[in-house]
Image (cartoon, rainbow, N blue to C red):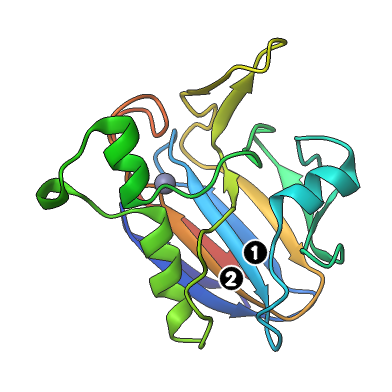
Amino acid sequence: MTQQFIVPPKKGLGLKVHKGQIIKVVDVEGQQVADFTAYHAKDFYEHLDQGATIDANQSINVKVGDHIYSNLYKPMLTLIEDTVGKHDLLLPACRPDMNRLLYGKHKDELQDTCYDNMSGALEQFGVPRPHMHYPFAIFMNTVLDEKGNLSVETPLSDAGDYVRLRAEMDLVVAFSSCPIEKGKCNGESVTALRVEIS
Ligand SMILES: [Zn+2]
């Protein structure tokens, strides 16, 4: 049986996932980043960790067959299928303070953010709001050049592209349809995501 969920544009979604279940994240219209994080279902000290994943895989890319690791260096998920092949493990979730610095937004025009979307989606499971989320940003096209410069380019995902992740432990997970409309991050328009659990 497959359960389907929609993450509306600019919004978040939180779910409980059991060990062995498959999480499919679909970019419905294309060029939309899906911030994703995960916590151990019973011990919220243990969570998805960008740095540990880079360290354990010896790569800034997660390839099919690779694990996504926790801060305790345990496999939390395995990437089992990927129709895009380009995601981000380097940048933190967008948050109001980032909008202020990078886009000059004032308090009264601050919008939804991945930090708030994921924190809010995790609240119902009792996960405390972290200082920051460092997600696996699915479909995010961050380009690192040989000098170490980073640029966020248009996602390579087309409508219907997806990744499939297998849960390697019982998890609480959160997704955010990244709300940034300026720049290339989400192809200059924010659209929905579909999540399927089987
Ligand atoms: Zn974001």
Q: Quadrant of the C terminus?
A: bottom right
Image mark for residue 23: 1
- Type of amino acid under label 2: Val
- Type of amino acid under label 1: Ile
Residue found 68% across the figure and 84% down from its top: 41
Label 1 – label 2 distance at C-alpha: 10 Å
- Taking the image as shown, residue 168 lies to the left or right of residue 32, namely right
Up-down: is 142 above or below 169?
above
Characterize the local packing of mark 2: few (<14), some (14-19) or many (20 or more) Cα atoms within 10 angstroms.
many
Q: Quadrant of the N terminus?
A: bottom right
Residue found 69% across the figure and 78% down from its top: 45
Pair 1/2: label in front: 2
Residue 65 shows up from this direction: no
Characterize the local packing of mark 1: few (<14), some (14-19) or many (20 or more) Cα atoms within 10 angstroms.
many
Residue 7 shows up from this direction: yes
Up-down: is 43 above or below 179?
below
What is the x, y in percent for residue 188? 30, 29
Mark 2 within 8 Å of ligand 1, using the beta carbon: no
In the rendered structure, are the residues bearing label 1 and label 2 in contact, judged by CB atoms less than 8 Å apart? yes
What is the x, y in percent for residue 42? 70, 89
Residue most extreme to the left? 108
Image mark for residue 173: 2
Q: Quadrant of residue 169?
A: bottom right
Residue found 48% across the figure and 73% down from its top: 14
**Which of the marked residues, 1 or 2, is nearer the chain's N terminus?**
1
Residue nearest the observer in this picture, 15 or 150? 150
Q: Secondary structure at mark 2?
A: strand
What is the x, y in percent for residue 58? 89, 38
Image mark for residue 89: none
- Taking the image as shown, residue 146 lies to the left or right of residue 72, namely left
Q: Secondary structure at mark 1?
A: strand
